[in-house]
Amino acid sequence: MNHTATWDETAIWSGRQTLALGRVQLEAGETLPEVEVAYETFGRLNAAKDNAVLICHALTGDAHAGGPTEEPGWWQPLIGPGKALDPERWYIICSNVLGGCNGTTGPQSPDPAQDGRPYGSRFPLITIRDMVNVQRQLVDALCIGELALVLGGSMGGLQVIEWAVSYPERVRACIPMAASGQLSALAIAYNEAMRSAIESDPAFAGGDYYGTAGPVNGLALARKIGMITYRSFSLFQSRFGHETSAADAPLGHTKFQIETYLDHQGAKLVNRFDANSYLRLIRAMDLHDIGRGRGGVEAAIQRIQSDLLWVGIDSDRLYPAEEQRAWAERILAQGKRALYREIASEHGHDAFLLEFDQINDIIIDFVGRVEGNTDGR
Ligand SMILES: CC(=O)SCCNC(=O)CCNC(=O)[C@H](O)C(C)(C)COP(=O)(O)OP(=O)(O)OC[C@H]1O[C@@H](n2cnc3c(N)ncnc32)[C@H](O)[C@@H]1OP(=O)(O)O
Ligand SMILES: N[C@@H](CCO)C(=O)O
């Protein structure tokens, strides 16, 4: 899909920027000596510096949420005049996460301690808190004190709630979507299956595969597993049902449409993502727990100062709607300003990347409530 600009994006889009942060201390104890963060911005920071919005991306996303490029950004339809993320009003920032493979320091990056060879297996364990710490340093460098809004889905949503707890005085409003405050056993289980798929590929070579094709089969299999969790029963059923690629093929050569679809999705990811990054990011998700080191989840929730809107998806099998509602209620029960909204969709978990009309309306409504100083309940 190509993207045709319908407004003058170029004038207010930063393009890909990179900021050198230097040494970054990680939650698990190690340090990364030379961290760089890749980011893109839309709009202008106003004189009061109170119009900054931070978008946090999901597992295989990147800093390109939108922009006047041939390849559309992953939240392109939400960004534009009159849209929820209107660059004429907001200064919108999106950065690639720590550990990623799209510009920010990750396992593919040169390791200064190894003559600039890629980190590979030596890239340290990172957490969602580390990702948020790097974003906070970027926000500092952009001279922003308080963020008007922090939002994102899935792994992006984990970052959003971590922001609200780690830096409560710096978040005015936040919207975690299809996320959690502590990763569920089911989500860890799928991550474990994906991890096994990558690590059991002989081409993984313990993570030191750069210079070779790498664990393409393992990464493709991991994506297939992931895709099954990102979509719903009814979507798969209505799109693929029991259809095969060739109706007259002998039974022993049957290939179902859902099988070729998963093959395609696996192959597509291998072309744009690094297996080591995939492993580091899913481990960071597993370890996500806003209560760690803070006296538990309830004590962590007590730290939140922002208005919060938790968004669930009715067909999400990975972060089920009942879990999403429960997180909103748990935060509300601590006396916080928390709302819950649900996206109605056949798309499953990935609806936060697809149901743009609903997401647009949900954001606009929430921002209006926050600005109207309603109590948000
Ligand atoms: C390429 C990039 O850089 S993407 C931008 C960065 N990535 C992100 O931000 C990650 C978030 N994005 C995503 O996860 C995805 O892009 C989503 C969820 C938004 C959309 O997923 P998609 O894969 O585009 O949608 P969908 O499930 O409809 O699959 C369509 C693809 O399956 C193919 N397909 C559909 N049915 C079949 C089938 N039976 N057999 C084989 N292939 C099939 C289509 O031809 C299409 O292929 P294409 O993507 O090469 O054009
Ligand atoms: N499908 C999205 C969401 C996964 O949680 C991605 O690949 O990033």
Image (cartoon, helix red, strand yellow):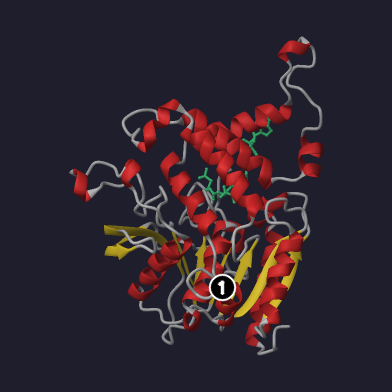
Front residue (pair 219, 341):
219
* Residue at 78% from the left image edge and 12% from the top image edge: 251
Picture coordinates of residue 137, whole percent (x, y)? 36, 70
Check the image and name the residue furthest to the front: 295
Check the image and name the residue furthest to the top: 250
Where does label 1 land, which residue? Answer: 296
The quadrant holding residue 21 is: bottom left
* Residue at 37% from the left image edge and 69% from the top image edge: 138
> Relative to 297, is 105 above or below?
above
Q: If the image is split into quadrants, where does the N terminus sit?
A: top right
* Residue at 81% from the left image edge and 38% from the top image edge: 238
210 relative to 277 in the view: left or right: left
Callout 1 crowding tier (Cα within 10 Å): few <14, some 14–19, many ≥20: few
Picture coordinates of residue 367, whole percent (x, y)? 64, 78
Instruction: Residue type at mark 1: give it.
Output: Gly
Front residue (pair 264, 87):
264
Picture coordinates of residue 6, whole percent (x, y)? 57, 58
Picture coordinates of residue 226, whole percent (x, y)? 61, 42
The quadrant holding residue 363 is: bottom right
Q: If the image is split into quadrants, where does the C terminus sit?
A: bottom right
> Relative to 297, is 110 above or below?
above
109 relative to 198 in the view: left or right: left
